């Protein structure tokens, strides 16, 4: 996922969506949810160990002898070279990280943003966070208890799927606009706007 996003258009979409609901929508765009250096280094070390074992078996099978100290030195040099490469080219790190780990990091970031942006502090617990983390190709909707108890997860999943597709096609602005509009329609159905409704969260998208 790559691309830029028009903040003014997303803000306008949020304001429009909230005209029919007492729910509050907040958007966060993360370029990445972790640096992944330590995770990638651990995966690299494991891969070198497995490869070393295969090389050792191949040498044994071919009746070739390599001094143990030389073999260990080769392992260390391979790991050091890999670490230098990971430091020099950060974009390589995430390629070594399993998808479940990437998604776990992105989900943890979404929850941090939900709390740090005070989406959980609305008076009726009707805050909704729309979150995208580009490096992990991950999107999530985090709804507070006043919403999550009323809206089935399948409804959010459809919004998430469309947002991921839009982001992958470098249509971030359109993706957020559509996600906000769809979320607003759900909120209008389940928590329509009351006569004393007030705007409790900023109508904007934050990039981190």
Image: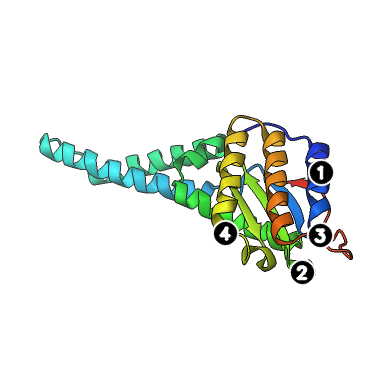
Q: Position of residue 151 (x, y in %)?
A: 62, 60
Residue 189: x %, y % from top left = 70, 56
Q: Which numbered marker is on residue 152? A: 4
Q: Where is residue 110 shown, x and y percent of the image?
A: 63, 55
Q: 106 or 45, which lies in front?
A: 106
Instruction: Tell me the element at label 1.
Output: helix
Q: Earlier in the sequence, mark 4 or mark 1?
A: 1
* Disc with the residue nearer the chain's start (2 vs 4): 2
Q: Give the residue at mark 3.
A: 193
In this orientation, does residue 71 appear? no
Residue 179 higher or lower than 126, as above or below: above
Identify the residue under disc 2. 124
Kindly report the distance in space between the C-alpha atoms of the residues bearing marks 2 and 1: 22 Å
Q: Nearer the viewer, mark 3 or mark 1?
A: 3
Distance from the alpha carbon under mark 4 to that under mark 1: 26 Å
Return the disc, 2 or 1, that comes first in the chain's sequence: 1
Q: Which mark is residue 70?
A: none
The reply to whether dot 4 and dot 3 touch (C-beta < 8 Å) is no
Which residue is rendered at x = 63% and y = 32% of the image?
2
Residue of label 1 = 11
Q: Can you tell which of label 2 and label 3 is closer to the viewer? A: 3
Distance from disc 2 to disc 4, alpha carbons, whole Å, reads 18 Å
CA neighbours of label 4 inside 10 A, class few (<14), some (14 to 19), many (20+): few
Q: CA distance from mark 4 to mark 3?
A: 20 Å
């Amino acid at each position: 996922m790559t691309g830029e996003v028009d903040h003014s258009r997303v803000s306008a979409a949020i304001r429009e969506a909230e005209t029919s609901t007492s729910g509050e929508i907040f958007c966060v765009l993360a370029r990445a949810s972790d640096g992944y250096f330590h995770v990638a280094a651990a995966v690299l070390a494991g891969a070198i160990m497995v490869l070393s074992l295969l090389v050792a078996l191949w040498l044994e099978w071919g009746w070739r002898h390599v001094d143990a100290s030389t073999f260990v030195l080769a392992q260390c040099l391979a790991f050091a070279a890999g670490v230098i490469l990971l430091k020099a080219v950060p974009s390589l790190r995430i390629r070594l990280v399993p998808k479940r780990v990437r998604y776990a990091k992105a989900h943890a970031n979404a929850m941090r943003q939900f709390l740090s942006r005070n989406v959980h502090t609305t008076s009726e617990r009707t805050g909704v966070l729309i979150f995208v983390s580009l490096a992990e190709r991950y999107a999530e909707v985090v709804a507070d208890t006043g919403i999550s108890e009323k809206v089935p997860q399948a409804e959010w999943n459809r919004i998430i799927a469309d947002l991921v597709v839009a982001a992958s096609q470098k249509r971030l602005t359109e993706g957020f606009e559509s996600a906000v509009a769809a979320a607003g329609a759900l909120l209008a159905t389940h928590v329509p706007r009351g006569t004393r409704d007030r705007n409790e969260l900023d109508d904007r998208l934050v990039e981190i």
